[in-house]
């Protein structure tokens, strides 16, 4: 199959992905300000991330499969406009329940990222699929980076609410650009009913072993990722460091490492090295918690840990998607939706656990939690490797008989 992706189309979708994922991560440098403004106890502020991820998970299950049913361009435009409305609601929310509801709606619409990933995977030639997914995922990583930088800077200038109101305006502008420039999606050959599509999505967890394996990796790596980024604002904003929103947002520059990892991991997956990439990245993820624990002693060492963690998480994330989508274009949206449901589950659990652990035992305990989660993921990869080796040896002996 010949690729119909142009450089401009890929770049446009990468930019859109960056902005979409930014709406999920705006809150991370702002958690302390939100808690103070709304009078929320510190151990409960993790629910800000949890509510966003709950909405995200619901969107993955109910909205992303629509990419296999209707024109993806119309779906993306609708999500952009609804996301803008949800962001306006967040910026105007003046009580805790309303804030959680509007954040959940923001997460619900942010799943447009997965619609774009599935679209890119379906348009790319087989030998370029990993690279194309990696390019769009690089946009996702840059969106996470810009979310932290921009939200911190805007919050210092005009308060945390301005972050969401400005983002709403940008999404409306981006919707106009996509409406004028993005080609209409290719017609879907098979159009099952929506109910059948949702049932098929849930059945993937039961029948697709690769999805279960890569989904568990997704739960664990993003739980570790969320443990760090949801809790780090607490020690950084407290004495003796007492960093501002802008200064905390600067730590997001470490996301550049994730951008590099995304592109490289996609190419390695295309070369048949996905499993090896996964193992090396998980080992790096586990080790990253050692320098991260030094936040109160050396910010340089702490940044090294953040770099290692972001690089490792994005390498596994892109490899997961590349392996899942290889040769399965017709069900790309359902596979991505099912896999990213695991991502959302891990992110939400990591955020809630991190704020609870920090409030009781401090930063060292948070790093211990992250290391345990990462080590479990590495142990699971080793176990799968042994199982594959044993299965291959059994098949080889059977052929020799």
Image (cartoon, rainbow, N blue to C red):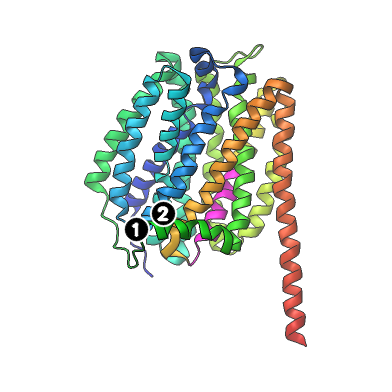
Position of residue 282 measured from the top left corner of the image (x, y, whole percent): 68, 47
Q: Secondary structure at mark 2?
A: helix
Q: At which x and y percent is residue 126?
A: 45, 66
Dominant secondary structure of the residues highlighted in magenta in the image? helix
| Quarter placement of the N terminus | bottom left
Q: Magenta part of the protein: which range?
A: 311-327
For mark 1, give the secondary structure: loop
For disc 1, the neighbor class at 10 Å (few under 14, some 14 to 19, many from 20) is some
Q: Is residue 313 magenta?
A: yes
Does any portion of residue 5 appear in the rendered image? yes
Q: Which residue is mark 2?
A: 65
The quarter of the picture where the C terminus appears is: bottom right
Q: Are marks 1 and 2 in contact (CB under 8 Å)?
A: yes
- At a point 68% along the width and 24% down the height, the residue shown is 358
Q: Point out which mark residue 162 bears.
A: none
* Front residue of this view, candidates 72 and 174: 72
**Circle 1 sits on which residue?**
69
């Amino acid at each position: 199959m010949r690729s119909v992706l142009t450089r401009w189309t890929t770049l446009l979708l990468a930019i859109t992905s960056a902005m979409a994922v930014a709406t999920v991560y705006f809150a991370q440098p702002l958690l302390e300000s939100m808690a103070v403004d709304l009078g929320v106890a510190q151990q409960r502020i993790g629910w800000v991330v949890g509510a966003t991820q709950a909405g995200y998970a619901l969107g993955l299950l109910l909205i992303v499969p629509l990419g296999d049913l209707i024109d993806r361009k119309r779906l993306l435009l609708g999500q952009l406009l609804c996301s803008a409305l949800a962001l306006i609601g967040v910026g105007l929310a003046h009580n805790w329940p309303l804030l959680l509801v509007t954040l959940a709606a923001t997460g619900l619409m942010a799943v447009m990222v997965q619609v774009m990933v599935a679209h890119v995977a379906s348009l790319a030639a087989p030998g370029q699929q990993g690279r194309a997914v990696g390019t769009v995922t690089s946009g996702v990583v840059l969106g996470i980076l810009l979310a932290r930088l921009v939200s911190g800077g805007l919050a210092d200038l005009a308060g945390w609410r301005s972050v969401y109101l400005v983002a709403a305006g940008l999404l409306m502008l981006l919707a106009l650009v996509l409406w004028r420039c993005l080609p209409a999606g290719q017609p879907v050959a098979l159009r099952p009913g929506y109910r059948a599509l949702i049932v098929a999505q849930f059945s993937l967890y039961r029948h697709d072993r690769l999805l279960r394996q890569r989904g568990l990796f997704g739960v664990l790596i993003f739980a570790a990722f969320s443990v760090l980024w949801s809790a780090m604002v607490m020690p950084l904003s407290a004495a003796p460091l007492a960093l501002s929103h802008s200064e905390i947002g600067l730590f997001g520059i470490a996301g550049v490492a994730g951008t590099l990892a995304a592109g490289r991991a996609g190419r390695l997956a295309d070369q048949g090295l996905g499993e090896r990439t996964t193992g090396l990245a998980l080992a790096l993820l586990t080790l990253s918690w050692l320098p991260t624990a030094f936040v109160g002693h050396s910010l340089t060492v702490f940044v090294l840990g953040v770099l290692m963690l972001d690089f490792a998480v994005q390498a596994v994330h892109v490899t997961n998607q590349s392996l899942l989508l290889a040769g399965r274009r017709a069900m790309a949206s359902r596979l991505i939706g099912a896999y990213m449901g695991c991502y959302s589950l891990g992110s939400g659990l990591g955020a809630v656990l991190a704020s609870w652990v920090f409030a009781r035992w401090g930063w060292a305990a948070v790093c211990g939690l992250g290391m345990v989660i990462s080590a479990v993921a590495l142990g699971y990869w080793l176990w799968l490797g042994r199982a594959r080796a044993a299965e291959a040896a059994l098949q080889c002996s059977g052929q020799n008989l």
